[in-house]
């Protein structure tokens, strides 16, 4: 890497580098895992999700085209006050959940023993009573 002063820093395993994470779908900070014989970065590990993958240049967000209404299925209506999350309780689609780690969320899908919950822009699969 070159900086404005012309000093060249040689990259090493364990150094931090910002790049696109395919699992997080965002530009994130990564640790360098391995280098090519030429000294270029080959593999990195995301500091957020811990996934290891090939090094990719940072992606720039694509300009969004203005479109008409979406044809995707509507999200379920949120029902009632938020309930505290517990694995021993049963939840239904539309229930609001207050999770100690992830915060306030809405149940999007329910299946045998598991629920998919949307916490802001993030989706999590949680266990619940069957």
Image (spheres, rainbow, N blue to C red):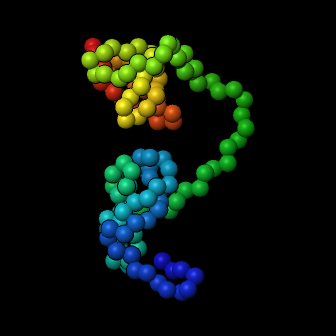
Q: How many labels does the image show?
A: 0
- Answer whether residue 15 is visible to the viewer in this image: yes
- Observer-nearest residue: 108 or 78? 78
Picture quarter containing residue 38?
A: bottom left
Residue at 45%, 16% (x, y): give it: 95
Residue at 33%, 51% (x, y): give it: 50
Can you say which quadrant of the picture contains the C terminus? top left
Picture quarter containing residue 128?
A: top left
Above or below residue 58? Residue 3 is below
- Observer-nearest residue: 29 or 97? 97
Q: Where is residue 99 in the image (x, y as percent from the top left)?
A: 38, 28
- Observer-nearest residue: 47 or 42? 47
Residue at 63%, 24% (x, y): give it: 71
Left or right of 39? Residue 65 is right
* Residue placed furthest toward the bottom: 6
Above or below residue 2? Residue 30 is above
Q: Position of residue 7 (x, y in %)?
A: 49, 86
Residue at 41%, 13% (x, y): give it: 92
Q: Where is residue 80 in the image (x, y as percent from the top left)?
A: 49, 13
Above or below residue 102? Residue 111 is above
- Answer whether residue 112 is visible to the viewer in this image: no
Q: Position of residue 16 (x, y in %)?
A: 40, 66
């Amino acid at each position: 890497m070159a900086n404005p002063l012309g000093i060249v820093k040689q990259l090493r395993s364990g150094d931090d580098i910002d790049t696109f994470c395919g699992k997080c779908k965002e530009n994130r900070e990564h640790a360098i895992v391995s280098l090519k014989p030429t000294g270029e970065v080959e593999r990195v590990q995301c500091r957020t999700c811990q996934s290891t993958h090939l090094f990719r240049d940072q992606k720039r967000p694509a300009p969004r085209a203005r479109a008409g209404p979406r044809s995707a299925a509507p999200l379920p209506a949120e029902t009632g006050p938020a309930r505290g999350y517990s694995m021993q309780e049963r939840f239904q689609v539309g229930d609001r959940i207050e999770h100690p780690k992830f915060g306030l969320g809405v149940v999007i899908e329910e299946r045998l023993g598991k629920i998919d919950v949307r916490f802001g822009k993030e989706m999590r699969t949680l266990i619940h009573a069957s």
